[in-house]
Image (spheres, rainbow, N blue to C red):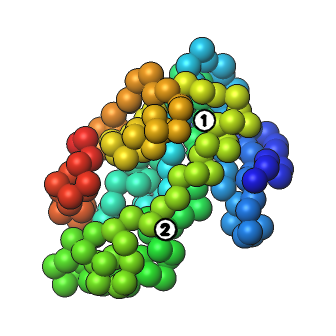
Amino acid sequence: MANTAESFLPTAFGDFRILTFSDKDLFHPHVVLLSEKTATVPTIRIHSECLTGDVFASLRCDCGDQLHASLRMIQENGGALLYLRQEGRGIGLTEKIKAYALQEQGHDTYKANELLGHGQDERDFNIVLEMLQQLGWKAVNLITNNPEKINFLQNHNITVVERIPLVISSNAHNAAYLEAKKIIKGHLL
């Protein structure tokens, strides 16, 4: 998979280069937002698409807040946001909305996915390796609370120099969601 397009992108968080990485789905490429500030060790965020949180500012999750906080940190320190088009932990938007309905019945986010016939998390981070290779980065500071992302990079010979935590306040709508992430998947909240 190769970088298929590139341009300048001014944002509310500062100026970036936007690069697309297409695979089979040319209409929904993965994206890298590359800070124009250089760093000895780049700061990165691996962020999976969340239409409800990223675009509609849903209070059911912390995704939009994580995205915005990460863009600020990347702009300040130099690095990149790796935006992966894997909605709903890889199950797609329609299935994610069905999972929301199951959560309204009292199931946690992971159990809801399982009840729909999916794994707890079906994301594939292999594209990250190609993105980092094309950027020429073998060591990074990683903005994450997810130990699986740290392990994935380290298991693929990418040095995680520092884990940068994302401290996002919970609310009445996402407290149970965040607690499930902490208890079931060991998120470092």
What residue is drawn where x is 19% and y is 84%? 105
Residue 91, image x, y percentages: 47, 74
Q: Are marks 2 and 1 in contact (CB under 8 Å)?
A: no
Binning the other alpha carbons within 10 Å of mark 2 as few (below 14), some (14 to 19) or many (20 upward) gives: many
Give 124 or 65, whichever is nearer the viewer.
124
State the separation of the CA atoms marked 2 and 1. 21 Å
Instruction: Give me the disc on residue 80.
Output: 1
Mark whose residue sits in front, 2 or 1: 2
Give 139 or 76, whichever is nearer the viewer.
139
| Res 111 visible | yes
Relative placement, left or right, of 38 versus 121 is right
Does dot 2 land on a helix, a strand or a loop? helix
Residue 7, image x, y percentages: 82, 43
Give 169 or 129, whichever is nearer the viewer.
129
Q: Quadrant of the C terminus?
A: top left
Can you say whether 53 is above or below 158 in the image?
below
Q: Amino acid at mark 1?
A: Ala
In which image quadrant can residue 52 be found?
bottom left
What residue is drawn where x is 25% and y is 41%? 188
| Res 14 visible | no
Relative placement, left or right, of 104 versus 149 is left
Instruction: Give me the disc on residue 9.
Output: none
Residue 177, image x, y percentages: 24, 62
Can you say whether 180 is above or below 160 in the image?
below
Binning the other alpha carbons within 10 Å of mark 1 as few (below 14), some (14 to 19) or many (20 upward) gives: many
Residue receiving disc 2: 90
| Of the image marks 2 and 1, the number of the one nearer the N terminus | 1
Can you say whether 177 is above or below 41 in the image?
below
